[in-house]
Image (cartoon, helix red, strand yellow):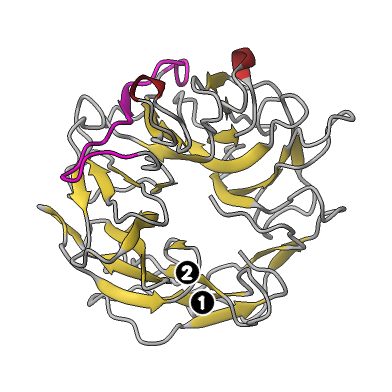
Amino acid sequence: MPRAHRFDQIMVSYGASGGLPMMPSWTSTPSTSTDGFGSSVASAGDINGDGFGDVVVGAPSATNAAMVSTGAVSIFFGSATGLSLTAQRVSVGAAGDQFGYAVSAAGDVNGDGFGDLVVGAISASPGGRTSAGTVYVFHGGASGVAATPAAEIAGTVPRGALGAVVTGAHDLNADRFADIVVAAPLADDPAEGESEVGVVRCFHGGASGVGSTPTREWTRVEGPAGLASGYRVGRSLSRPGDINGDGFGDVVFGSGDNNAKRDALWSAGSMQGASANLTRISTASSADREVGAQVDLGDANGDGFDDLLLQFRVDGMRRTEVRAGGAVGVAASGALVVAGHYDAGFVGDINGDGRAETIVAVNTIPIFVWPTAAQLYRGNPGLSWVMPDWFVSGPSFR
């Protein structure tokens, strides 16, 4: 759950058949550099139903009604000429809640034709449970999202940080209502006397939206070496995808701390939703650490099966690779995209060739301790990369 201390500008580059332009197509600069504007950024889907994609930006340290660090999100609406310069601003909760720490498109959870939004507030204290966290779901409409959330999902474990990672637009049970998946990676297990075990919860959509009771939950994910404190189930979540092409959405999530190998975990969707049975996704070397530090799903080779982006640490350096999906699941090994850098993920099909592109944050200025640039690698049939196809730099890039 890394966050840099300061964000100065949000940049968006519009895709085209020739790839991305060298300069950003749209920028937004916050009025203050202390509210964390841009610490979370995501495609918001089509919230107002006008046929254009929208963007949501979180500012978890923003002040609202004199309440410091309540947090806020800004929604920039798309149009034929690009993103709007002004935004719809939404803020709920109390001082210190950090609303907007994580943001994601929820998909259409209630089937009304408008995209919905899911937002995490990791330091909220529902029911007096300190920093248990809260996840909010907002329904979209012709004028944007409603000011009042349609659903509030309260964390149950003090200091569990529910909402640290959120993702939506899944359809795990293929009922045409979008589902959401949320995580509390710092949740303890008091019954076993273990700390930071973590938990991942799935919530199905329906005609009324998502309910407050999870349809699936994973927390004590036992493995060959057993479970120790610090497993941090849900430290990363993939975006929606279908690895095995069966028509049901899948979920991949990461776990682990800096000192243990751990594995990423895959739950295949079914008519009943996400499976309770998990497939472990590991690496060959027992020396690897933080397997699943970042995970994502996208069809990088254009074969109709979503592929897995998997990041882990080797000898202190991060490694990002892509493993092919297929009818029997994820390949046991993958193609190296890049080694030694920061966050990574798929960014959709930028050049219209039917394949997802991969973006990786990198540090090009050694005196800085945060990413300063991004590299983009185009999808290709062989999942083979040597050099990035596109590069953009800035003073602080994430």
| Residue 224 colored in magenta in the image | yes
Left or right of 359, for residue 323? left
Residue 89 higher or lower than 83, as above or below? above
C-alpha gap between disc 1 and disc 2: 6 Å
Residue at the spot 39% in from the left edge and 35% down from the top edge: 197
Q: Which residue is tagged 2? A: 359
In which quarter of the view is residue 351 placed?
bottom left
Residue 290 in the image: state x and y as whole percent. 37, 57
Amino acid type of disc 1? Answer: Gln
Tell me if mark 1 has few (under 14), some (14-19) or many (20+) residues whose alpha carbon lies within 10 angstroms of its own: some
Is residue 341 something that shows in the picture?
A: yes
Q: Nearest the camera: 30 or 320?
A: 320
Label drawn at residue 375: 1
Q: Residue at x 19, y 27 (%)?
A: 271
Q: Which residues are magenta?
A: 207-228
Q: Is residue 68 above or below residue 350?
A: above
State which tag comes first along the sequence, 1 or 2.
Answer: 2
- Height in image: 356 above or below 258? below
Say what secondary structure mark 2 lies in: strand
Which residue occupies the extreme right position in the image?
Answer: 66
Q: To which quarter of the image does residue 58 belong?
A: top right
For badge 2, the amino acid type reads: Ile
Dot 1 and dot 2 residues touching (CB under 8 Å): yes
Q: Picture coordinates of residue 126 (x, y %)?
A: 61, 17
Q: Quadrant of the C terminus?
A: bottom right
Q: Is residue 391 left or right of residue 334?
A: right
Mark 2 residue crowding within 10 angstroms, few (<14) / some (14–19) / many (20+): many
Looking at the picture, does residue 14 appear above or below residue 340?
Answer: above
